[in-house]
Image: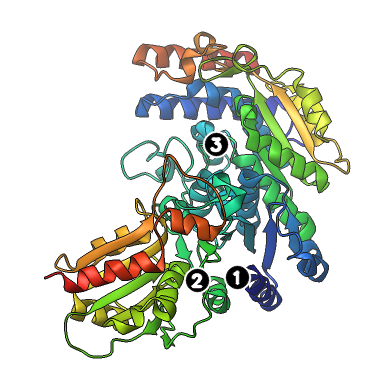
Amino acid sequence: MTEVTRPEALARAALAIRRRFLGMHHQARSGHIGSGLSAIDLLTYLYAAWLQPIDQLILSKGHAASALYATLNHFGKLSDAELSTYYQDGTLLPAHPAPGGVAAIPAATGSLGHGLPIAVGMAHSYKHLRSSEARVACLLSDGECNEGSTWEAALFAAHHHLDNLTVLVDANGIQAFGRTEEVLALEPFAKKWEAFGFDVSECNGHDFAQIHAALGRPALSRPRCVIARTIKGRGVSFMENTVDWHYWPMSDAQYGQAIAELDQAERELFR
Amino acid sequence: MRVAFVEAVDDALARDPKSLFITGDLGFNAFESLVVKYGARFINAGVAEQSMIGLAAGVALTGLRPWVYSIAPFATYRCVEQIRNDLCLHRLPVCVVGNGGGFTYGIMGPTHHALEDLAVLKALPNIQLFFPCASDQVAAAVGSIAALDGPSYLRLAVSAYDTACAPISENPLTLTRSYAKRSDAREPAATVIGAGHGVQVALRALAAHGLDRENVDVFGMTRFPFRLADDSALMASVLETKKVVFVEEHYAAGGMGESLRLALPSQVDFSLLSASYRPDQRYGSAAFHMHQTQLTPEVLVELVRARLSAP
């Protein structure tokens, strides 16, 4: 592991991104906070350690756009001025990514089940048509694995041996109206991806050493799926593991408490 | 029309090394030569239209230009959200090709008919629709599409009234065809316009049902959005006759006739001959369906005569 990919350095970056992310949501009074917090550690790892300049990330769970905006800002790919327009009238940064709004976001998403087919098309083109070494990562929610188009694309990826494709599932176990296992059970989830022909591993999606172990190992001759077990709302105690924080914006008091919890986490990190 | 398409797309693939062909597992006995000739540039996405459009978008995002093929109902309805979000919103140069518009697949049953495809797609942003009048116009449509920098839909169809009829002229910008000219400039006169292969109903009427004895101009329109400013011959006719009879193998709601009516001056007498859904409908050949829905040369001639004699 290099200096920037040491777990402590990544944890520090993720804290800064969470702080920025909560500030954006507080200012905008916008929801989808829990879905962003569950993905921020994964996004941090991807941008700090995994994505090379020629690689692409498709955020299939478009409702985590604000987490991606905050991450891109942290890594210098989205200016403070642009970020300050988030959720405001006239912005190119709406709640779900818009087409052409940000150079680092190749595809508009937000309707679930669209990201993986797009990512598969890019990976197929790089590997079989363009002779490019570029890799493609696609960040899915577990809920969007209800969508048939996700599995259509999975079939294609395995059939065409797209070893340049990494599917990363932010498996926080909660979807829009309830717990994933209660709404439309996905388990045994890893076995499903294995049966579809993927090289599957699971990790704790908030443990950078585990994320690194899962995403950093050499590719086999097939597409990869990493099921990152995450906690919706991760990092803010009262938001963790609830359906409510898929929707609610924060009050001033809640924002104050959330920031106080990040301050506490930061003190513990530097102790 | 499919044979003409294979030849035209073969030419387009040969000309542009960035182009490729993706099928949703259809094209048996049609695309085999493309498979051999283009290798990795021919992709069978499987029976998975949503994923097929999404992956065409992904391929296009890497700088390539896919042609995506299925039969018209499958290429449009199942994946309309993918066409809207993944292709239209991103303005990607992907052509969705739907074979068998209208009643082409007659006896295959109603799941295989495409009578709302243009209605669904015309509402989407940034997409251009092409619906050739006849097989001998497919190459021109494919050539126009190959030069676009955004998404398109190509509706291939075979009419029950397929009539080999050479056009008098074709507008190089709009691909609108003139098939018949009025015998004299006097009124009453009418302009008969067919949308794509819908014009075949009028051609049949000209050849065998006496439409040629009426004082009419006949045009075939092939593109949407319309480019009426470039369609000088058609517009001159409409403004002179002030009577339009429009024929399309498509439902009236959302069809091309509806859009053209709104685009023309309100004093133009506009009549529409289109398909309709019948709760008691039965199934048969394309010709059977055209007859059942009263989309026939006889009905067209009757309608034209009624409008000509109207004040």
Q: Secondary structure at mark 1?
A: loop
Q: How many marks?
A: 3
Residue type (three-letter) at the residue carrying disc 1? Met
Where's residue A127, x and y in %?
Answer: 78, 55
Where's residue B116, x and y in %?
Answer: 44, 51
Question: In the rendered image, which quarter contains the N terminus of chain B?
Answer: bottom right
> What residue does disc 2 label?
B132
Colour approach in the figure: rainbow
Residue type (three-letter) at the residue carrying disc 2? Pro
User: Pointer 2 indicates a residue of which chain?
Assistant: B
> What residue does disc 3 label?
A68
Tell me, yes or no, whether the two marked residues, 1 and 3, touch with CB atoms within 8 Å.
no
Q: Which residue is depicted at the point 31% across and 40% down? A: A89
Where's residue A171, x and y in %?
Answer: 66, 22
Q: Quadrant of residue B182?
A: bottom left
Q: CA distance from mark 3 to mark 2?
A: 44 Å
Structural crowding at the residue carrying mark 3, measured as other residues with C-alpha within 10 Å and reported as few (<14), some (14–19) or many (≥20): many
Q: Is residue A209 above or below residue B16?
A: above
- Does the image show residue A182? yes
* Disc assigned to residue B43: none
Tell me, yes or no, whether the two marked residues, 2 and 1, touch with CB atoms within 8 Å.
yes
Q: Give whichever of B38, B92 is nearer the camera.
A: B38
Q: Is residue A179 above or below residue B187?
A: above
For this orientation, the residue located farthest to the bottom is: B184
Q: Is residue B122 above or below residue A8?
A: below
Q: Which residue is depicted at the point 48% across and 23% down? A: A33
* Disc assigned to residue B1: 1
